[in-house]
């Protein structure tokens, strides 16, 4: 799964919405997935961050490619250039 939405009228790019930012330590309106933590004896957890902190994570050398792609999709949707 690449994080993009598909279907008639759906916007391309990662799902961004209300969620808990792991850095701001509060609920934000622009949260997006930045990591997937696997659980040994149960379901894993999706870690989310606001767009500002997601961009910080995406710039790190060990950031997953899907996060970099999600940030690029946000920029493309907003008409920003890399």
Image (cartoon, rainbow, N blue to C red):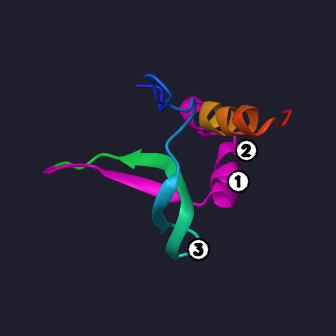
| Residue position for label 1 | 56
Q: Find out whether the residues at labels 1 and 2 contact each other: C-beta distance under 8 Å.
A: yes
- Quadrant (top left/top right/bottom left/bottom right) for the N terminus: top left
Query: Is residue 75 shown in magenta?
Result: no
Per the model, the C-alpha gap separating discs 3 and 1 is 13 Å
Magenta part of the chain: 41-67
Q: Residue at x 55, y 31 (%)?
A: 66
Q: Secondary structure at mark 1?
A: helix
Frontmost of labels 3 and 2 is: 3
Of the pair 48 and 37, the residue shown nearer to us: 48
Count neighbours of disc 1 (C-alpha within 10 A) and say few if under 14, some if 14 to 19, many if 20 or more. few
Mark 3 or 1 closer to N-term? 3
- Quadrant (top left/top right/bottom left/bottom right) for the C terminus: top right
- Examine the image and state in which quarter residue 52 appears: bottom right
| Residue position for label 2 | 59
Give above or below for 18 relative to 13: below
Q: Secondary structure at mark 2?
A: loop
Question: How many numbered marks appear?
Answer: 3
Mark 3 or 2 closer to N-term? 3
Q: Residue furthest front?
A: 9
Per the model, the C-alpha gap separating discs 3 and 2 is 18 Å
Of the pair 82 and 38, the residue shown nearer to us: 82
The disc placed on residue 15 is none
Q: Secondary structure at mark 3?
A: loop
Across and down, in percent, residue 34 comes to: 52, 48
| Residue position for label 3 | 24
Count neighbours of disc 2 (C-alpha within 10 A) and say few if under 14, some if 14 to 19, many if 20 or more. some
Q: Residue at x 24, y 50 (%)?
A: 39
Query: Is residue 65 shown in magenta?
Result: yes
């Amino acid at each position: 799964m690449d994080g993009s939405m598909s279907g008639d009228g759906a916007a391309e790019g990662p799902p961004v919405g209300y969620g808990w930012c792991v850095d701001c330590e509060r609920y934000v309106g622009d949260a997006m997935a930045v990591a997937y933590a696997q659980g040994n004896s149960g379901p894993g957890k999706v870690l989310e961050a606001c767009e500002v902190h997601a961009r910080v994570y995406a710039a790190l050398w060990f950031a997953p490619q899907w996060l970099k792609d999600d940030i690029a999709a946000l920029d493309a949707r907003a008409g920003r250039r890399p």
